[in-house]
Image (cartoon, grey):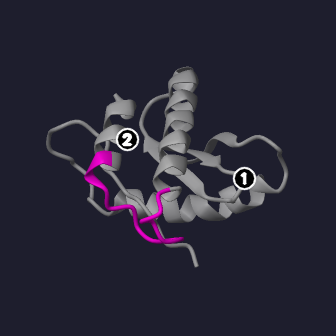
Amino acid sequence: NDCPVYEADLSGQGVRDDSPHLDEFVLNAALDIVDDIVWTTTAMHLRHVDKFNEFNVSAYCTAGHTRFMLVHKTRHDNAQAIRSFFNELHDLYIKAVMSPFCTPDARIESPAFDQRVKASAK
């Protein structure tokens, strides 16, 4: 029952030289690793969990086991910025799902949520 509730391309403007679906494949492959790591730690920020060629996958898991995953090309020296992004995303997610108009496990389609996520990614 792993269904994404929100997806966004946070990369800058420009032309990609890889497949537009590559991110989905990399994230789906990393889901199994995240599921294993979640039960071995009490930390929410799971850090760098997987790598595929030049793409790194970082993950964050909430207390309710909602997983936030980020595919990025940056190295580990930018870990604090990624941690900050996940913390802001978690706050935004809580505010979105606490809305009385949000149904559980439904996709988050709010343009305001999307705009805030993209602003926190910068």
Residue 52 appears anywhere in the view: no
Q: Quadrant of the C terminus?
A: top left
Secondary structure of the residue carrying numbered label 2: helix
Report if residue 62 lies within the magenta region.
no
| Residue sitting farthest toward the bottom | 1
- Horizontal and vertical percent position of residue 38: 76, 54
Q: Which mark is residue 117?
A: 2
Name the residue located 14 percent from the left edge and 39 percent from the top edge.
14
The image shows residue 40, relative to residue 54, as above or below, that is below
- Horizontal and vertical percent position of residue 10: 32, 42
Q: Quadrant of the N terminus?
A: bottom right
- Horizontal and vertical percent position of residue 5: 45, 64
- In the figure, is residue 45 to the left or right of 76? right
Q: Tag 2: residue type? A: Val
Comparing 46 with 119, the one in front is 119
- In the figure, is residue 57 to the left or right of 6? right
Name the residue located 68 percent from the left edge and 42 percent from the top edge.
46
Residue 20 sits in which quadrant?
A: bottom left
Q: Which residues are magenta?
A: 99-112
- Dot 1 surroundings within 10 Å: few (below 14), some, or many (20 or more)? few
- In the figure, is residue 46 to the left or right of 72? right
Which residue is tagged 1? 63
